[in-house]
Amino acid sequence: MKLLEGKNALITGASKGIGRAIALHFAAHGANIAFTYLSSVEQGQALEQELTSQGVKAKGYRSDASDFLQAEQLVNSVIADFGSLDVLVNNAGITQDNLLLRMTEAMWDQVINVNLKSCFNTVKAATKQFMKQKSGSIINMTSVVGLKGNAGQANYAASKAGIIGFTKSVALELGSRGIRCNAVAPGFIETEMTAKLDEKTIQAWREGIPLKRGGKPEDVADACVFLASDLSSYITGQVLQVDGGMLT
């Protein structure tokens, strides 16, 4: 059963990791995929071909969602190219970890802009289309760090906690127009980034999780398919933790 048949989805930051898994899962469920990438040009082009080979319409856009005007232009281009927009996934994100005493203003500003401001930019740009349709599902990627904080990640935690407040506010504002807004909070997900870490460190993290394993990008993608689909038509303003029980 294809849960997203005929829906048009926009996913930011989809050239690798969790974003890529979401794009592939959405396409497998019949969605047409618009996605953004910034520095990973070759990976973005490869993903477009891979998605198209699944029999759906797919197009990659080189765009910076943290730039207000670029985000507006992106959404307008996607609507022009695809005819409508049904699902928006804000997945673009970065880290600039350091202890607060060593954190520079630039490290703070960049993480807040890329992780949090980008959500405001894309949601604001897409809202007019969603309101016209009287439908739409917005999925914002937060993190368990946004729920509990983390030493050395004050900027990242603040950006991800901000996404939760933003998500709940949007859900309250737009619910009467048939528009849903939810957040997904991944825990320890094993991606290309974590592959660079020491195996002993990774194993120690796994042992601290009730399910005794790190998550896969596909675990997060499955949660996003549910929130994008009509199976979650009465769910809005929620934070869905995909963390193996880490914060239980």
Image (cartoon, grey):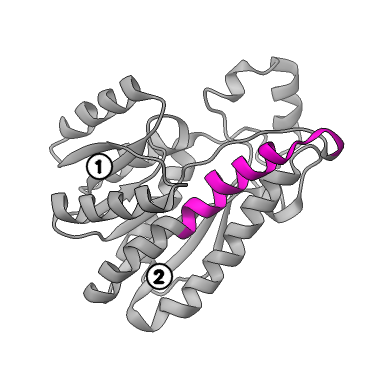
- Tag 2: amino acid: Arg
Q: Residue at x 66, y 49 (%)?
A: 144
53 in magenta? no
Q: Which residue is drawn at 87% across and 37% down?
A: 101
Q: Is residue 194 left or right of residue 35?
A: right
Neighbour tally class for label 1: few under 14, some 14-19, many 20 plus, Cα within 10 Å: many
Res 6 visible: no
Q: Distance between the residues labelled 2 and 1?
A: 21 Å
Mark in front: 2 vs 1: 2
Q: Is residue 66 left or right of residue 75?
A: right
Which residue lies under the disc numbered 1?
Answer: 27
Q: Which residue is drawn at 53% across and 27% down?
A: 191
Neighbour tally class for label 2: few under 14, some 14-19, many 20 plus, Cα within 10 Å: many
118 in magenta? yes
- Position in image of residue 185 (x %, y %): 58, 51
Residue 92 drawn above or below residue 180: above
Name the element at disc 2: strand
Residue 112 drawn above or below residue 46: below
Task: Give me the disc on residue 180.
Answer: 2
- Position in image of residue 55 (x %, y %): 12, 37
- Tag 1: amino acid: Ala
- Position in image of residue 241 (x %, y %): 59, 53
Residue 103 drawn above or below residue 4: above
Q: Image quadrant for the C terminus? A: bottom right
The residue range painted magenta reads: 101-120
Name the element at disc 1: helix
Q: Which residue is drawn at 42% across and 53% down?
A: 68
Between 56 and 247, the one nearer to me in the picture:
56
Res 189 visible: yes
> Quadrant of the rendered structure where residue 195 is?
top right
Magenta highlight: main SS: helix
